[in-house]
Image (cartoon, rainbow, N blue to C red):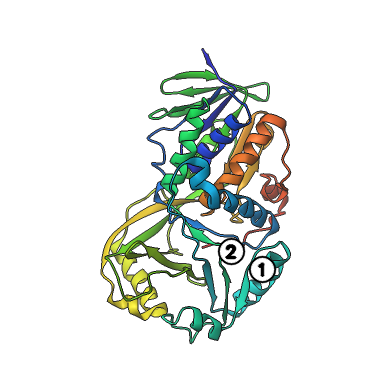
């Protein structure tokens, strides 16, 4: 039987980041298995947002560390990721959201995030193309932005391979053998790998991997649709990522086009990644309301991606998950996995090699759901 020190299940950005960080720490015998091709799942379908504007301290700290990676990724990984630091502009139209925004900004500023509160007049000065009669205020952080998720994941994968990681595509994990309370092996469609450590970074498929060790992880897949207009010149060439928070609608530049999306509150859980023309009509209506110029845009394409969602919109991160020794997880990011992947990959690598991390992972314990100690992340789109 083949042996490995660590087997990583999932070939998205979280998996490739973890593989890279493990190899960098000197873990020589690492195998990453991906049932299709690298970046063929949620990572490649992501809108690529990167931000520091979160509502709880643990998420802010992870995002601050991750942002430092993105800011230097091109030179450190010899990979161009099309990183655009044009900021995130959140808009509040509901009094409860505006009150929470103000509390969030106070916390973010205490932690060193260069975020500021904006009045409707401030927002109009920054983005005169927006309709603001229903807006109470907003928040803006100039260090926020977006990048190409595919390039980031492949940059991690390329460096991981150079450091000795074995990355195996078309290799599906079918089962995990557990004996005497600890991980023993991964059974894949191309053979069995004996290992003391398995990392579940399977994203929307995280619950299936959890069942392989007898756990029911509260992670559910939800479709999130993204649409791109034809080239559109009626908005400035450089705009922030604009988040209309109450309806979870957003838009930003995508080259000469505009990329946009919105949460469908009526969407049931599924693995559906098609796009829906009826939902596009709703998104277009919201776009024309918030930025009237977009009423003149023609749509060119669309797709569906998957969020891996937990009951409190925070991930499950840690070691020996569910009491299974050697079972590591970083799943359930509820749309934040790409932007937090650089730091989370490093956190997992340290947990695996030393058993410790300097980050406070208590908000991300699996046990919080049973103990009803959920902190919950409020800045979810």
Q: Quarter of the image holding residue 96?
A: bottom right
Q: Residue at x 56, y 60 (%)?
A: 51
Image coords of residue 91 (percent x, y): 53, 75
Callout 1 crowding tier (Cα within 10 Å): few <14, some 14–19, many ≥20: many
Q: Position of residue 12 (x, y in %)?
A: 46, 41
Placement of 319 over or under 146, stated as above or below: above
Regarding residue 51, the answer to whether it shows in the image is: yes
Q: Which residue is mark 1?
A: 104
Element carrying mark 1: helix
> Farthest top residue?
1
Residue in view at x 46 percent, y 78 percent: 127
Asked which quadrant contains residue 323, the reply is top right
Rendered position, 243 above or below 225: below
Which image quarter: residue 110?
bottom right
Verify CB contact (< 8 Å) between mark 2 and mark 1.
yes
Give the labeled residue for mark 2: 379
Within-10-Å neighbours for mark 2: few <14, some 14–19, many 20+: some
The residue tagged with tag 2: helix, strand or loop?
A: loop
**Nearer to the camera, 12 or 314:** 12
């Amino acid at each position: 039987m083949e042996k490995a020190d660590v087997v990583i299940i999932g070939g998205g950005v979280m998996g490739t980041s973890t593989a890279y960080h493990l190899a960098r720490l000197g873990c020589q015998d690492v195998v990453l298995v991906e049932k299709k091709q690298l970046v063929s799942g949620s990572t490649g379908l992501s809108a690529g947002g990167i931000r520091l504007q979160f509502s709880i301290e643990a998420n802010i700290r992870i995002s601050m560390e991750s942002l430092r990676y993105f800011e230097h990724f091109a030179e450190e990984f010899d990979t161009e990721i099309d990183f655009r630091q044009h900021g995130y502009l959140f808009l509040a139209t509901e009094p409860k959201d505006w009150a929470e925004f103000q509390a969030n900004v106070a916390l973010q500023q205490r932690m060193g995030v260069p975020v500021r509160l904006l009045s409707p007049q401030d927002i109009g000065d920054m983005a005169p193309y927006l309709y603001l009669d229903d807006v109470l205020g907003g928040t803006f952080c100039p260090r926020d932005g977006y990048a190409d998720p595919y390039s980031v994941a492949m940059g991690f994968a390329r460096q991981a391979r150079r450091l000795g990681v074995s990355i195996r595509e078309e290799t599906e994990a079918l089962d995990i053998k557990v004996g005497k309370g600890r991980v023993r092996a991964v059974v894949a469609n191309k053979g069995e790998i004996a290992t003391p450590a398995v990392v579940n970074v399977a994203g929307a498929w995280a619950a299936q991997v959890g069942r392989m060790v007898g756990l029911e992880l509260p992670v559910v897949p939800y479709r999130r649709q993204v649409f791109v207009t034809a080239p559109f010149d009626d908005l400035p060439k450089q705009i922030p990522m604009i988040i209309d928070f109450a309806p979870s609608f957003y838009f930003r530049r995508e080259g000469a086009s505009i990329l946009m999306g919105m949460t469908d509150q009526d969407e049931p859980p599924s693995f559906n990644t098609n796009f829906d023309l009826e939902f596009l009509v709703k998104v277009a209506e919201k776009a024309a309301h918030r930025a009237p110029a977009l009423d003149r845009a023609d749509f060119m394409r669309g797709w569906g991606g998957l969020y891996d969602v937990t009951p409190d919109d925070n991930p499950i991160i840690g070691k020996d998950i569910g009491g299974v020794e050697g079972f590591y997880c970083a799943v359930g990011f509820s749309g934040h996995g790409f932007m937090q992947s650089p730091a989370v990959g490093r956190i997992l690598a340290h947990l695996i090699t030393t058993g410790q991390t300097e980050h406070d992972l208590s908000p991300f314990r699996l046990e919080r759901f049973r103990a009803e100690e959920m902190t919950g992340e409020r800045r979810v789109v």
